[in-house]
């Protein structure tokens, strides 16, 4: 039974967007998953590096490129979930290429959105769902923002918000190049607590 102040039980889909699961990102995804399960959320998870698909749109969107089974499973999990959580490292102030390739392949009309006749307005098919972005970087988040601006907009607004997700929570962790085990443990604990809040 959920106690007072405990978030309503949610269906959560976790995507580890780092191509290598044996990384800090993988460990953070583990902690979030552990926390979410402790409050009895239903959790599904996919690890990007274990998915089999072609990340390249060879003809752009001119020709329909058939979706591989893992991409169909990804779409099914996003539609199933109340809350979508993406873990990824910021490389050159954006997401890894393989993660962008995944989005290019699956974020399609009929799944994430539909354009209304005329092409200037669109229907956002993911309304009613929330999302979290958990991002690691070798640069301190404040410094990254001051030098490069908001590096989360591509995913937060151009992809998630465009499809109707909201609210969208952004959690950034850096400077990580020489973070040490104590700092890594503190970050893991913070992400574990995010999982316990389904945030």
Image (cartoon, grey):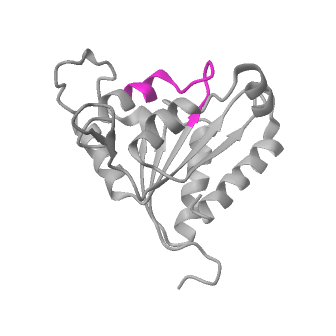
Drawn side of residue 99 relative to residue 27, left or right:
left
Quadrant where the C terminus sits is bottom right
Residue at position x 25%, y 39% from top?
116
Residue at position x 43%, y 35% from top?
48
Q: How many marks?
A: 0
Drawn side of residue 117 relative to residue 153, left or right:
left
- Rendering coords of residue 171 (x, y %): 66, 45
Nearer-the-camera pick, 124 or 155: 124
Quarter occupied by residue 151? top right
Question: Looking at the picture, does residue 34 appear above or below residue 98?
Answer: below
Nearer-the-camera pick, 103 or 123: 123
Residue at position x 64%, y 58% from top?
194
Quarter occupied by residue 145? top right
Furthest toward the top, the residue is 59
Residue 148 covered by magenta stretch: no
Question: Looking at the picture, does residue 33 appear above or below residue 97?
Answer: below
Residue at position x 51%, y 37% from top?
157
In the image, the segment drawn in magenta is 88-101
Question: Looking at the picture, does residue 158 appear above or below residue 189?
Answer: above
Residue 89 covered by magenta stretch: yes
Drawn side of residue 21 relative to residue 54, left or right:
right
- Rendering coords of residue 155 (x, y %): 51, 34
- Rendering coords of residue 61 (x, y %): 24, 21
Drawn side of residue 67 relative to residue 135, left or right:
left
- Rendering coords of residue 5 (x, y %): 65, 78
């Amino acid at each position: 039974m959920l106690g007072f102040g405990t978030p309503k039980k949610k269906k959560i889909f976790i995507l580890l967007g780092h191509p290598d699961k044996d990384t800090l990102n993988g460990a953070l995804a583990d902690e979030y998953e552990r926390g979410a399960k402790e409050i009895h959320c239903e959790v599904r998870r996919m690890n990007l590096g274990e998915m089999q698909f072609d990340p390249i749109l060879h003809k752009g969107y001119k020709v329909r490129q058939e979706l591989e089974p893992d991409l169909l499973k990804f779409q099914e999990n996003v539609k199933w979930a109340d809350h979508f959580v993406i873990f990824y490292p910021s490389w050159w102030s954006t997401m890894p290429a393989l993660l962008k390739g995944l989005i290019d392949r699956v974020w399609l009309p009929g799944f994430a959105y539909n354009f209304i006749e005329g092409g200037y307005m669109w229907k956002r098919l993911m309304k009613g769902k929330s999302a979290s972005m958990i991002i690691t970087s070798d640069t301190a988040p404040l410094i990254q923002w001051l030098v490069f601006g908001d590096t989360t907009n591509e995913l937060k607004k151009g992809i998630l918000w465009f499809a109707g997700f909201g609210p969208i929570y952004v959690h950034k962790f850096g400077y990580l190049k020489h973070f040490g085990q104590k700092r890594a443990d503190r970050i893991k604990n913070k992400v574990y607590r995010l999982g316990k809040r389904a945030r």
